[in-house]
Amino acid sequence: MGQAEDDPTVTDPDHYGVIFENDRVRVLEYRDVPGTRTHPHHHPDSVMYTLSGFERRISSGDRVMEVALEPGETRWLPDQVHVGENTGSTATHAIFVELKEPRVPGGPSGDAASAGSARPRA
């Protein structure tokens, strides 16, 4: 089974790599340097864990967001197509755990209202 042309490992293979995959999840590692801009790509419902602090501009359709994240942040990312640009002065290093199972009808929506952010506990 081939990968879709909007898969991040296809659109930006120099930045995204698969580090684990099974029938339920795919884990991607992402790295870039300041000024890097990705091509439009798709992520299913995912959890992102930041290994470095970074600043990004995320563009999805008509929506543009400026994001600043610290190392060790964890975020829920609902299914989306976007372009990312490293607008800061530091390299980006993050892990994405992409879910392969479809959302359960009547289950959590994963929309912005239910998006979470957490830091590891000491």
Image (tube, rainbow, N blue to C red):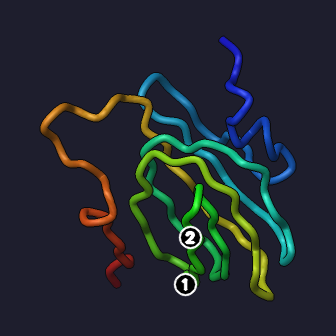
Left or right: 121 in relation to 8: left
Q: Position of residue 117 (x, y in %)?
A: 36, 73
Quarter of the picture containing the N terminus is top right
Q: Which residue is mark 1?
A: 70
State the image quarter where residue 69 is shown. bottom right
Q: Label 2 amino acid?
A: Thr
> What residue appears at the point 68 percent right and 25 percent down from the top-left corner?
4
Where 72 sits versus 30, above or below?
below
Q: Position of residue 99 (x, y in %)?
A: 43, 38
Q: Residue furthest left?
A: 106
Tell me the SS state at disc 1.
loop
Q: Which residue is mark 2?
A: 50
Tell me the SS state at disc 2.
strand
Check contact, mark 2 vs mark 1: CB within 8 A: yes
Crowd around label 2: few <14 · some 14–19 · many ≥20 (10 Å):
some
Q: Earlier in the sequence, mark 2 or mark 1?
A: 2
Q: Position of residue 49 (x, y in %)?
A: 51, 64
> What residue appears at the point 31 percent right and 56 percent down from the top-left corner?
111
